[in-house]
Amino acid sequence: MTTPPAAVPTRNILARIGAGSPLYVFAIYATGHIFSLILIGTSASHGGRGLAAAGGLVWLIGTITAYVIVTWFRDDDTVAAGFLFGICVGGGSMTAFLLLMIIHDRSLGGAILGFMAVLIPSAIWTAAAMALGMVLISFGRFLHPGIATPVPPPRRH
């Protein structure tokens, strides 16, 4: 009988994601948004409210995960972290919309036309998400300044 591998704490996983490329955060949010749109679209075509609720829950989990990584597990200042969060939210939403239009229409032309129709509102949403992200990130860092990084011990002279 073999022993199961030791569980990796969530804090270590988030720290590794935060230490990596900002595209990891973007990929987490975009993947959650794509799955949520698939669930919501499926619920609309089949009339199930449970799938719509599950889609909203998946989107919320992806958004909160991206917020936690950007706020406490990256070494960016507040402006850069808010910019990264806004780009993740706006760009992830546009990426999810474009991929789902390609899947739904089975055509690149229709997807590009649909993408161009939502480009200006998505740019406005991205700018608003950047501003809101800066406020939320600075508030989160104010409430819990040392969640990700341990405080070093004081020096002895």
Image (spheres, helix red, strand yellow):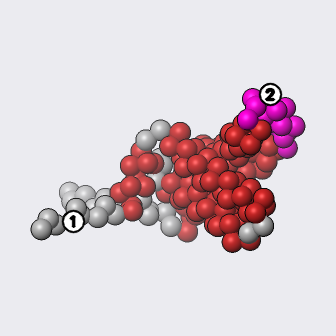
Could you tell me which residue is drawn at 68 percent across and 66 percent down? Answer: 51
Q: Tell which circle, 1 or 2, labels the residue nearer the N-terminal end.
A: 1
- Could you say where residue 8 lies in the image, as x and y percent from the top left? 31, 61
Give amino acid for label 2: Gly
Left or right of 51 in this view: 123: right
Could one spot residue 80 in this view of the protein? yes
Q: Is residue 100 magenta?
A: no
Could you tell me which residue is drawn at 47 percent across and 38 percent down? Answer: 21
User: Relative to residue 16, is residue 143 depicted above or below?
Assistant: below
Could one spot residue 132 in this view of the protein? no
Tell me which segment is drawn in magenta.
Answer: 106-121
* Residue identified by numbered label 1: 4
Q: Which image quadrant for residue 124?
A: top right
Label 2: element kind: helix
Cβ atoms at labels 1 and 2 below 8 Å apart:
no
* Residue identified by numbered label 2: 109
Q: Residue furthest front?
A: 46
| Badge nearest the viewer, 1 or 2 | 2
Left or right of 151 in this view: 57: right
User: Relative to residue 85, is residue 153 depicted above or below?
Assistant: below
Q: Examine the residues drawn in magenta and state their main secondary structure.
A: helix
- Could you say where residue 34 lies in the image, as x and y percent from the top left? 64, 49
